Amino acid sequence: MNSVPVFDIAAPQLYRCQVHRYFSGLSRLYVSAFKPYQTTPAFFLLFSDVAYFEGPMGWESADFRLAPHDECVALLLETGIIGEAVRQFPEAYAAVTETANLYKVHTPRTCVQLIAGSAALLPEIPASL
């Protein structure tokens, strides 16, 4: 199965991303995206209801893809976010598995992946963030 692009970004592989801030109480992850050779972010990516993040603090490419749902559930199981009981009682975990999405970006050096409820592209964020 092919993954689906998350954001409508022209040439997303040209951007470099940097974790900007994570709010644990809100489970929100803000990522700054920079054009080549720029020091001011071109835009920000907001991931809400974040349950899992794997990757460096900075990476090349903003080409996030939505992975197949089965892959998301497999990672939820592998990381212990949900238990094996999901296989016998899927409705008991529906609140988690039906709202969780696995977002991935493959870079020349690594694969960044995170599980979150939603993602949005923001042209700017408050300076206080």
Image (cartoon, helix red, strand yellow):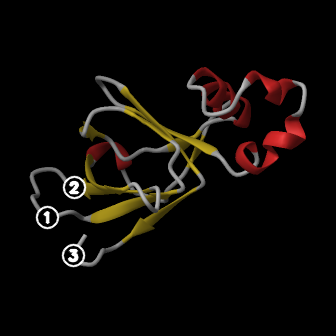
Instruction: Left or right? Give the position of 63 relative to 80.
Output: left
- The residue at which mark 3 appears reads as 128
Q: In which quarter of the image is residue 30?
A: bottom left
**Frontmost residue, 120 versus 62:** 120
Q: Where is residue 63 in the image (x, y as percent from the top left)?
A: 42, 44
Secondary structure found at label 2: strand
Which amino acid is tagged 3?
A: Ser
Q: Where is residue 73 in the image (x, y as percent from the top left)?
A: 69, 31
Secondary structure found at label 3: loop
Which amino acid is tagged 1?
A: Thr
Q: In which quarter of the image is residue 32?
A: bottom left
Q: Quadrant of the N terminus?
A: top right
Q: Which residue is drawn at 76% across and 22% down?
A: 84
Gap in angstroms between the C-alphas marked 1 and 2:
7 Å
In the depicted structure, whether residue 60 falls above or below residue 47: above
How crowded is the residue under tag 3: few (<14 C-alpha within 10 Å), some, or many (20+)? Answer: few
In the depicted structure, whether residue 81 falls above or below residue 39: above
Gap in angstroms between the C-alphas marked 3 and 1:
15 Å
Instruction: Left or right? Give the position of 41 relative to 65.
Output: left
- First-in-chain label (3 vs 1): 1
- The residue at which mark 2 appears reads as 34
- First-in-chain label (1 vs 2): 2
Instruction: Left or right? Give the position of 62 relative to 19.
Output: right
Mark 3–mark 1 CB contact (< 8 Å): no
| Image disc number at residue 2 | none
- First-in-chain label (3 vs 2): 2
- The residue at which mark 1 appears reads as 40
How crowded is the residue under tag 1: few (<14 C-alpha within 10 Å), some, or many (20+)? Answer: few
How crowded is the residue under tag 2: few (<14 C-alpha within 10 Å), some, or many (20+)? Answer: many
**Frontmost residue, 127 versus 110:** 127
Mark 1–mark 2 CB contact (< 8 Å): yes
